[in-house]
Image: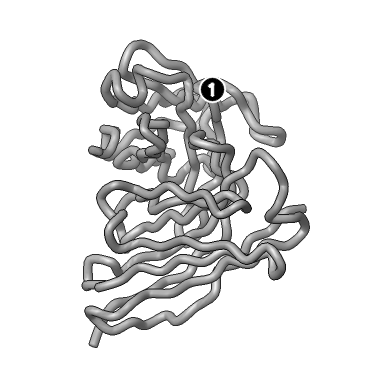
Amino acid sequence: QSALTQPPSASGSPGQSVTISCTGTSSDVGGYNYVSWYQQHPGKAPKLMIYEVSKRPSGVPDRFSGSKSGNTASLTVSGLQAEDEADYYCSSYAGSNNLVFGTGTKVTVL
Amino acid sequence: QLQLQESGPGLVKPSETLSLTCTVSGGSISSSSYYWGWIRQPPGKGLEWIGSIYYSGSTYYNPSLKSRVTISVDTSKNQFSLKLSSVTAADTAVYYCARHPYQLPTIDPWGQGTLVTVSS
């Protein structure tokens, strides 16, 4: 199984929006509505931000939203804040009891 | 509040077996619907799912690591464990334990992670 493809970096000014893509295949992202997104600050464990493509766990601001079209999932962070600067990873069920992660995207708040 | 904590040696010699334990507190590892998994992250790199186990002992592993991985559970101690054999420098990583529903990448919560270095 191959890692899902994410852009290495993305950036935006405070208050702006940034969208991160996560591209897989019909065997993972495109085949199931089981895509999650994680935020990871340096030296910390990942934190679940979005699950099942577009659902937000309790406590996650509604500035974070997820979507999917075909084999590509996306995470949008609206109204960027300084604390949103972090690495973001997508993950998907990949069939046959496999889970696969994305390559990761570093978000910089300018 | 459910919490997970990894423990084990921080240094392992090449060709030996890496062994880690995850202790679950604030809830029972025998709760239905959830699997307990291991994920790792080499320094400066991305996340890789290693494998997961149900309290009954049912397991499933990343195909790329399957030949070297064994995950077990001890419900009496509310713990589950990872063994990775024949390690090399490429296995140097922060190892996380976590909980997730069967087959789903809805991983939450995570342990704080523990760095394991493979070096002689």
Residue A74 x %, y %: 40, 22
Task: Establish if B72 lies above or below A20.
Answer: below
Chain on which label 1 sits: A
Q: Position of residue B107 (x, y in %)?
A: 54, 43
* Residue named by callout 1: A65
Q: Position of residue A22 (x, y in %)?
A: 33, 28
Q: Is residue A43 left or right of residue A6?
A: right
Taking the image as shown, residue B33 lies to the left or right of residue B114, namely: right
The answer to whether residue A60 is left or right of residue B90 is right
- Compared to residue B82, the image places residue B46 above or below, namely above
| Residue B108 position (above or below residue B120) | above
Residue A46 vs residue A19: left or right?
right
Q: Nearer the viewer, residue B93 or A12?
A: B93
Task: Work out which quarter of the rendered image holds the C terminus of chain A and state it.
Answer: top left
Residue shown at 57%/66% (left/top)? B22
Residue farthest along the top direction in this orientation: A69
Residue B85: name its quadrant: bottom left
Other-residue count near label 1 (Cα within 10 Å), few / some / many at <14 / 14–19 / ≥20: many
Q: Nearer the viewer, residue A72 or B72?
A: B72
Instruction: Where is residue B23? Give x, y as percent.
Output: 64, 67
The residue shown at (49%, 43%) is: A39
Q: Is residue B106 above or below residue B87?
A: above
What residue is rendered at 28% in x and 67% in y? B91
Mark 1 residue element: strand
Residue ranking furthest to the bottom = B120
Amino acid type of the residue that numbered disc 1 sits on in the rendered structure: Ser
